[in-house]
Image: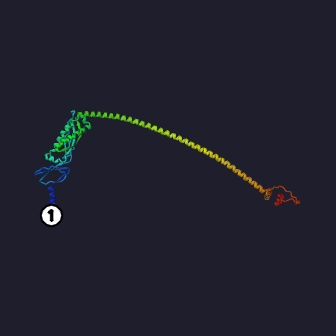
Amino acid sequence: MKKLVFLLIILILTPLLVMFLFKRVPPATIGIKQSQWGGGIIHADYSTGFHLGVSGYHKWHFLPSTTHFLHYTDNDARSSSPTVSYDRPLQIRAADGNVVNYEVTVAYRIINGEAWQIVDDGLKIQYKDRVKSKVTAILRDELSKLSSENLQLTDERLELVGEALPVLTADLKEFHCRADSILIRRLRFQAEYEEKLQDKQFLRQKALLDAAGTVLAEEEKTVNLIERQIQAAELSLIQTWEKTIQEKKSEYEVIIAGIRAEASVYAAETMAKGDADKVIAEANGQLALEKAEALRNELRTAALNSEGGRILLALDAAQNLDIPRVTLNSDDPNVPTILDLSELTKMLVGEN
């Protein structure tokens, strides 16, 4: 039970002790600590987080650490923020006497490590007004250096801003702030001058347009010249390639004609040789046939000259014998009968 009571006491006292001994600095805020019982402002800036600060002994002041914006504009869409302030556009007489309405935005912030000096100087509330007054005075002084003609040139305006920014930063150190940038958002001349200016701008733009047209014409001339050169080069290359192709074509046609001529000669020679070989072969064949025929006749003659040959001839003669009329004499036994071939043969060839 005692342990539980002790634990409850610790849980209750710990947050109270933390709240009593420490102070939380919110985000995007610089904390400045002041000792109320002697010592005054502590010479240090405290960033976001918890810092030692005994309640009742220390007093805390807070300043924004983000960028401050000071707008000189007629824009009605105004945001409510402790770091943003608005004022009417600046009416400044240019170097040539024309009155110009400027819409300008100046961005600045508290210098790191010097927020405590703002509180120490008693400017915790007034430093924004002091900065605004200083910025307005410097802008009036610096922006009046340009003439109406120069204000119309972007480079001239940027150069003016680049020169005015270090001057503004140096003067704002008095209030422990530094300028980050100056932006000329818009500038307007009086109605009469605006009308003349618009006419002049129109003439200037027309002159620029005419100059651009001249440049365009020159470029078109150059392009046309290049196109003609390209066409000429293309035509030259085409003619060169056509000539090369024709030469190669003629060269290969000559080669092909030579090959065809050689082929024709070879074909003629081969056909002539073939015809000659054919005639020779036919003659040799005919000679061989004639020799075979002669040999056949010779062998046949030799065969027929033999006894068997004579008998064969006799039989053949008897078979081919055509006796249209026969007169028989029955009283003469020496007359052979034609019906007896053997006897007829004996009569024709004799008896061996």
The structure residue drawn at horizontal position 18% and vertical position 44%, both measured from the top left corner, is 177
The structure residue drawn at horizontal position 57% and vertical position 42%, both measured from the top left corner, is 258
SS at badge 1: helix
Locate residue 243, reporting x and y percent. Answer: 50, 38
Neighbor class of circle 1 (other Cα within 10 Å; few <14, some 14-19, many 20+) is few
User: Is residue 150 shown left or right of residue 240?
Assistant: left
Q: Residue furthest right?
A: 331
The answer to which of 11 and 80 lies nearer the viewer is 11
Tell me if I can see residue 98 in this picture.
Answer: no
Residue under numbered circle 1? 6
Say how the picture is coloured.
Answer: rainbow
Quadrant hosting residue 167: top left
Quadrant hosting residue 228: top left
Locate residue 162, reporting x and y percent. Answer: 23, 40
Locate residue 290, reporting x and y percent. Answer: 72, 51
Q: Residue furthest left?
A: 37
The structure residue drawn at horizontal position 13% and vertical position 47%, both measured from the top left corner, is 120
Tell me if I can see residue 204 in this picture.
Answer: yes
Locate residue 117, reporting x and y percent. Answer: 15, 47
User: Is residue 128 shown left or right of residue 268?
Assistant: left
Q: Is residue 67 above or below residue 299?
A: above
The answer to which of 92 and 3 lies nearer the viewer is 3
The answer to which of 213 and 20 lies nearer the viewer is 20
Q: Quadrant of the C terminus?
A: bottom right
User: Is residue 318 shown left or right of residue 49?
Assistant: right
Quadrant hosting residue 143: top left
Give the number of callouts: 1
Q: Is residue 48 above or below residue 129?
A: below
